[in-house]
Amino acid sequence: MTTESCILSSEAIQQDNIYGLSQITTSLFISNSAVANDKLTLSNNHITTIINASVEVANTFFDDIQYVHVPVSDAPNSYIYDFFDPIADYIHAVEVRNGRTLLHCVAGVSRSAAFCLAYLMKYHNMTLLDAHTWTKSCRPIIRPNSGFWEQLIHYEFKLFSKITVQMIYSPVGLIPNIYEKEVFFM
């Protein structure tokens, strides 16, 4: 991450509750669905926009927050590629207006992480590998499903004409090569 794109001090990264709210950039947070319904947490973190990337969770609407719903299932065959640009653009537009976005799915592990990685690639000029490394350092529980990884790899190639993560075969099926050590040393 370049200093121009996002400057975060260690105090700014909120990892106290890795299952709750995690700050990724100065204007982007990832969480589970429970946080999206917690008015106090939203207010304390100055959240102005919520992006709900799930089909299972209904929005709890608060008057001072804008909402976007991306109805996608957390399944390897779910097609999310066409949402990468519009969601990244939306997060960026909120940031330009000095707002803050909360991106959530059910657990804050797969769908919201995939959209976060796409945003970091597009607007912070990070490779997919770097975006994953950064996001995982802020929210250790992220783990997009294999279908989302394949689509993120295609998106990285579209943006940069190169790939930094590859899908490989493993005893548990097709996985990104960054998980290779985890699978083979289980």
Image (cartoon, helix red, strand yellow):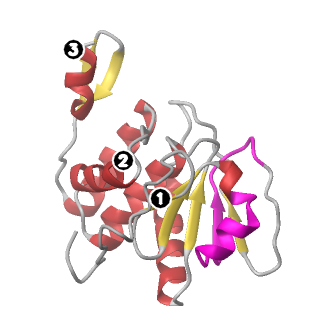
* Secondary structure under the numbered disc 3 in the rendered image: loop
The residue to which callout 2 is attached is 152
Task: Give how far across and how far down residue 32 sits, in percent.
Answer: 61, 48
Of the 4 image quadrants, the one containing the N terminus is bottom left
**Mark carried by residue 185:** 3
Q: Quadrant of residue 176?
A: top left
* Secondary structure under the numbered disc 2 in the rendered image: helix
Looking at the rendered image, the disc whose residue lies closer to the viewer, 1 or 3, is 3
Pick whichever, 107 or 157, lies toward us.
107
Residue at 56 percent across and 71 percent down: it is 101
Which three-letter amino acid code belongs to the residue tagged 2?
Leu
Task: State left or right for residue 58 relative to residue 104.
Answer: right
Task: Give how far across and how far down residue 53 sits, in percent.
Answer: 62, 52
Which three-letter amino acid code belongs to the residue tagged 1?
Phe
- In the image, residue 27 above or below residue 18: below
Q: Mark 3 Cα within 10 Å, few/some/many (few <14, many 20+)?
A: few
The residue to which callout 1 is attached is 84
Task: State left or right for residue 59 relative to residue 52.
Answer: right
Residue numbers of the magenta segment: 36-57
Q: Mark 1 Cα within 10 Å, few/some/many (few <14, many 20+)?
A: many
- In the image, residue 35 above or below residue 80: below
Which three-letter amino acid code belongs to the residue tagged 3?
Phe
Pick whichever, 170 or 42, lies toward us.
42
Looking at the image, tell me whether mark 3 or mark 2 is earlier in sequence order.
2
